[in-house]
Image: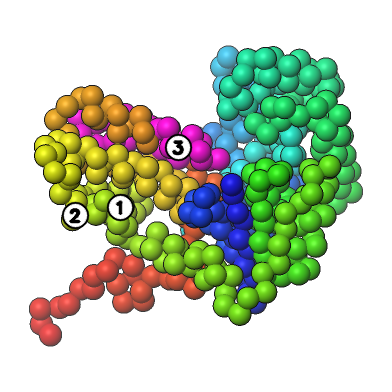
Amino acid sequence: MKQMIVHNEHNLMQMALLEEGKAVEFMAERTRERGLLGSYFKGRVVNVLPGMQAAFVDIGQKKNAFLYVDDVLHPNLEKQPKVKPSISELLRPGQDVIVQVLKEPVGSKGARVTTHYSLPGRWLVYMPLADYVAVSKKIAREGDRSRLKTLGEQLRRNEEGLIIRTVSAEEQREAIQADLETLREQWRLIREKADSLPSPSLLHRDHSMVQRIIRDVYTPGSDEVITDNEAQARELSALLEEICPGHQPKVQVYRGEESIFAAYRVQEQLNRDFARKVWLPGGGYIVIDHTEALTVVDVNTGKYTGAGGDSLEETVTETNMQAAVEIARLMRLRDIGGMIIVDFIDMEEAMNRHEVAATLENELKKDRTKAFVMGWTKLGLLELTRKKVREESTLPYVEPCSSCHGTGKRYISPLH
């Protein structure tokens, strides 16, 4: 069972996704500063850089957006030219273009945008120009996969593309078709606005943070949403009735005196899990550090000495197994993206190294964001990557120290 705990305070909305009472995802959004991810803009090409195979597009934000050549070519790989053309053959300065935000602005970098358009619905993802049908790899039964693939081919028109989502495994044709019609209408309105508005202009914004999560992960009959705002509860109930017809939505209003995050032990978990040092159930711990290029995770035995009679190898392997489970959860919770290096405690046996890597890989399958375990380096470090679409989540009102700038150290001159 999953619980979605929504806390509203002043201009800040926070949401924690709990699985069996444990926090696995956390998001925060200022209600007046909605994120850009998934939004559509009519932009204007400002500069084309053939050497970088990229262009900068003015979408009306503080920083120009970055458009890479691969995001301009046809979204169906089979229809792309064998030799990649120069981006100057595809775009020119001053040209208007409809783009969708693929990655949020991060630090000094503007948003990354694409012309590989997609509109997510409850049962499928609609891609108006992709010209193919795909079925989620998480649908295991071949009979379901074959049925949904055939259904997608029957429903799509001309060059439309569809991705059938995992939650559609046992869904009927009528619901999937109704979802597709809704998304087609959204795309029609986007194009209609693009024809009438100047550039740069916002054409379409995705649902709010809470609405997106509910749309993507809510399972009727078992999951529940708990919010401390009555108006929001009514809004979310209406959304669930729309996307899950025939099911009684489980939306509750919390009216306790203490904070909803305190009542459901969310704040306690966030304070612990966003620390640099995180303890493991058996007494070991992991340390997470960030650099400009990557994230480094160090695993230590700490207080864990193993069960009676365990060898050093068994103690080390057990600590590493606990760490693998916890690292996968923390990557989701803190939304850590990019390159990640894990320094597990050294293990002598190849079988144990394989088991630890397999455990981490299996835990990452629970993640809605794509992550890949690349393997062990010659130095015994485990390499993995996780797609980064926005800045790492952080607790509200936390910022780097003005003296040490977040390093934890400050230079003291020997002359003083």
Asked if marks 1 and 2 touch (Cβ < 8 Å), the reply is yes
Circle nearer the viewer, 1 or 3: 1
- The residues bearing labels 3 and 2 have C-alpha atoms spaced at a distance of 25 Å
Badge 1, how many Cα within 10 Å: few under 14, some, many 20+?
many
Label at residue 280: 1
Q: Residue at x 18, y 40 (%)?
A: 316
Label 3's element?
A: helix
Residue 260: percent from left, percent from top: 59, 70
- The residues bearing labels 1 and 2 have C-alpha atoms spaced at a distance of 9 Å
Span colored in magenta: 361-386
Q: Residue at x 86, y 34 (%)?
A: 178
Label at residue 302: 2
Quadrant in which residue 348 is drawn: top left
Q: Residue at x 29, y 72 (%)?
A: 404
> Is residue 359 found left or right of 153 in the rendered image?
left
Q: Residue at x 84, y 42 (%)?
A: 246
Q: Amino acid at mark 2?
A: Gly
Earlier in the chain: of badge 3 and badge 2, it is: 2
The relative height of residue 181 versus residue 403 in the rendered view (above or below) is above
Q: Is residue 370 magenta?
A: yes
Q: Amino acid at mark 1?
A: Leu
Residue 136: percent from left, percent from top: 62, 27
Residue 279: percent from left, percent from top: 30, 57
- The residues bearing labels 1 and 3 have C-alpha atoms spaced at a distance of 18 Å
Q: Amino acid at mark 3?
A: Leu
Residue at label 3?
364
Whether residue 140 is visible: yes
